[in-house]
Image (cartoon, grey):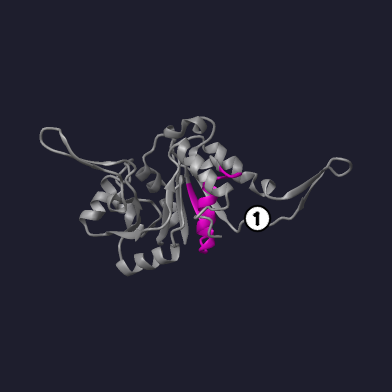
Amino acid sequence: MKVVILAGGYGTRISEESHLKPKPMIEIGDKPILWHIMKLYSHYGFHEFVICCGYMQHVIKQWFANYYLYNCDVTFDFTRENKLIVHNSEVEDWKVTLVDTGLNTGTGGRIKQIRKYIGNETFMMTYGDGVSDVNLEKLLQFHREKRAVVTLTAAKIRQRFGVLTIDGNSDITSFREKSESDSERVNAGFMVMEPEVFDYIDGDVYFEKEPLESLAQAGKLSAFKFDGFWKPMDTMRDKMQLEELWSGGDAPWKVW
């Protein structure tokens, strides 16, 4: 089963680093967050990826072109035969298709463009900027049981701020700190899709708008409720938090 990863956006909210590289290539530890996401999928036996590129797509292509070199010990022998000797050549068992889906294309438009690489098969899809410890086997099983066209992972996200109750006169009648009861579910990506989904994408649109709304109205969109770890890397603060988890050996998404 193929895994589609959306990796073409500008990443403007983390511009401190995204002006140099696309957001999926921003590193957690010494590896891009894209690598962390792919490691999760390959842990569950999904090794074939279709990556939708856009902004600075050449950076992603160059990284994969040199991936073998980056992850092995090598000897450059210039003395006689001018050859490259590779040592410890253990690399990922991945097949990666990188597709330039345009600079300003919406998420739906990017998905529409990779239809020819998917064929008439069920596939997975996620965003190139979020990590999780979601059990992908259980997600796929749930999707098959629901017989939906699209199943998305509905993760809990806690309210970050205190909660106010305000009356009609704009007077605050109560204030309390955030609690577990204030959490709500959001689309965390990590989706499973049937090829029928392409019929719901009309042109260059955002997948999270008309396509998902139409699927919901048709009763063909289901939610895999997930209470585990999920964190998108939207800002430098998010990156620093993920970096601290990784460097401290306490990264929940490292299930491999």
Judging by the rendered image, the residue that carries numbered circle 1 is 91
Left or right: 77, with 120 as reference point:
right
Counting from the top left corner in percent of width and height, residue 23 is at 49, 39
Left or right: 45, with 145 as reference point:
right
Q: Residue furthest left?
A: 168
What residue is drawn where x is 49% and y is 48%?
Answer: 51
Crowding at dot 1, Cα within 10 Å, few <14 / some 14-19 / many 20+, comes out as few
Counting from the top left corner in percent of width and height, residue 79 is at 88, 41
Counting from the top left corner in percent of width and height, residue 44 is at 51, 63
**As rendered, which of 180 and 130 lies closer to the eye?**
180
Say if residue 125 shows up in the picture.
Answer: yes
What residue is drawn where x is 44% and y is 62%?
Answer: 136
Q: Quarter of the image containing the C terminus? A: bottom right
Residue 45 in the magenta stretch? The answer is yes
Residue 22 in the magenta stretch? The answer is no
Residue 154 found in image quarter: bottom left
What residue is drawn where x is 71% and y is 50%?
Answer: 72
**As rendered, which of 206 and 120 lies closer to the eye?**
206
Residue 152 found in image quarter: bottom left
**Residues in magenta, as a range:** 28-51
Counting from the top left corner in percent of width and height, residue 43 is at 54, 61
